Amino acid sequence: MKRVFLSLIAFSAVVVTAQQEVVQTGTPAILEAANGKKIKVMLQSLKDENLTFQAFKSTKDMTVPASKIKFLQFFPKYDQEAVDASFAAGDFRAVLDVMEPVMADFIEYMPIDNNMRQAFVLVYNSYRFSGDYDNAAAYAEKLVASNDEALVLKGKAGLALVALAKGDVATAEKLSADITEKSEAGGLYLKAEIERAKGDPKQAVQTVTVIIENHANDIEWLPASELLSAYCYLDMAGETNSVISTNSALNTARQVKNMYAGSAVAADAEKLWASLGGAEQQARMDEEKAKMAAAAKERKEQRKAEEKAQREKKAAEKAARQAAEKAAKEAAAQQTDVSTSTETESE
């Protein structure tokens, strides 16, 4: 009977423990409030600039203005080094295969500052450079809604570029005007893109020249501007009587891919460079360089051999002179001895 009683107590304890367990859904994060306080939460949604979440081990929803949240710390699971390597290689599809399911949990919360924004921009660039303009626009909208001015500018520029890709020049021009107020270089870059879209690559190159001259340290817009000039050169190469050749585009693309290696712009530049026969040209250049190096090495070895032969010749001549001088001195000494002996005998 006592054994049954103890079993009942144990069973009751299990039931109570099970009733106390909390089953939560949502996105886990550490929420940092404006006052610096941090708490573990399960994020539920972000709607109308209000963030809804549950405290850790609680099913009670709490809703606060997003403006009261300083930072969200997420805990993604993916191989960042592999993703960065794919991105640097221009394999945007590989990036998206990994990051699309990862970002699904975080994209809603991008308007609030968080540790996934850099990854978010990487995915945005992957969509845009791979030609997936609908998804690129969706991500750009999230950037525009963020509380970071630099991301807002990037988002507006993205929307303008997507508009140009779809032939909507008017929208691009409107967004360009907004960007110019915050960034002269960014406004000029979009101006050049619009000029090219309107079929005036020469004017676009002139606009890019202004960016290069006046904003040489602007790492946000300069690389894209230099790559744009490569595409403009390619447009101009097809014009009748143009002094611009395909090599102008190829060489510019090569410079951009080398100077900005590891960036989305460099990856796009490498694709353009490869499509114009850059790899084959590089192989020819490498072969010619190897031949020149071999010839230079041969000439150097030949000079060394000639110099050695000259030194040996001079050494032999010197040795011969010294031997002749020695022989002459010995002969003179012997002659002197003979003369002395003869004089002595005469006396």
Image: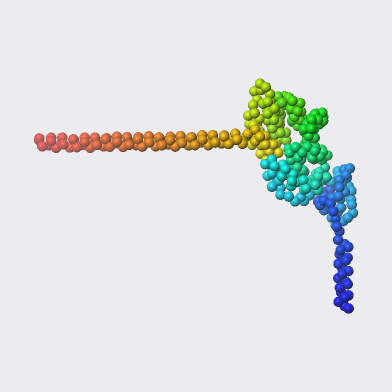
- The residue shown at (51%, 35%) is 291
- The residue shown at (60%, 35%) is 280
Q: Is residue 152 above or below residue 73?
A: above
**Residue 316 shows up from this direction:** yes
- The residue shown at (65%, 36%) is 274
**Residue 116 shows up from this direction:** no
Colouring mode (rainbow / by chain / secondary structure / one colour): rainbow
> Which image quadrant: the N terminus?
bottom right
Residue 127 in the figure: left or right of residue 332: right
Residue 80 rendering spot, x and y as whole percentages: 71, 47
The one of 197 and 152 positioned closer to us in this rendering: 197
Residue 14 in the figure: left or right of residue 150: right
Residue 272 rendering spot, x and y as whole percentages: 67, 34
Residue 126 in which image quadrant? top right
Residue 99 rendering spot, x and y as whole percentages: 75, 46
The one of 137 and 240 positioned closer to us in this rendering: 240
Residue 157 rendering spot, x and y as whole percentages: 78, 34
> Which image quadrant: the C terminus?
top left
- The residue shown at (82%, 51%) is 27
The one of 196 and 347 positioned closer to us in this rendering: 196
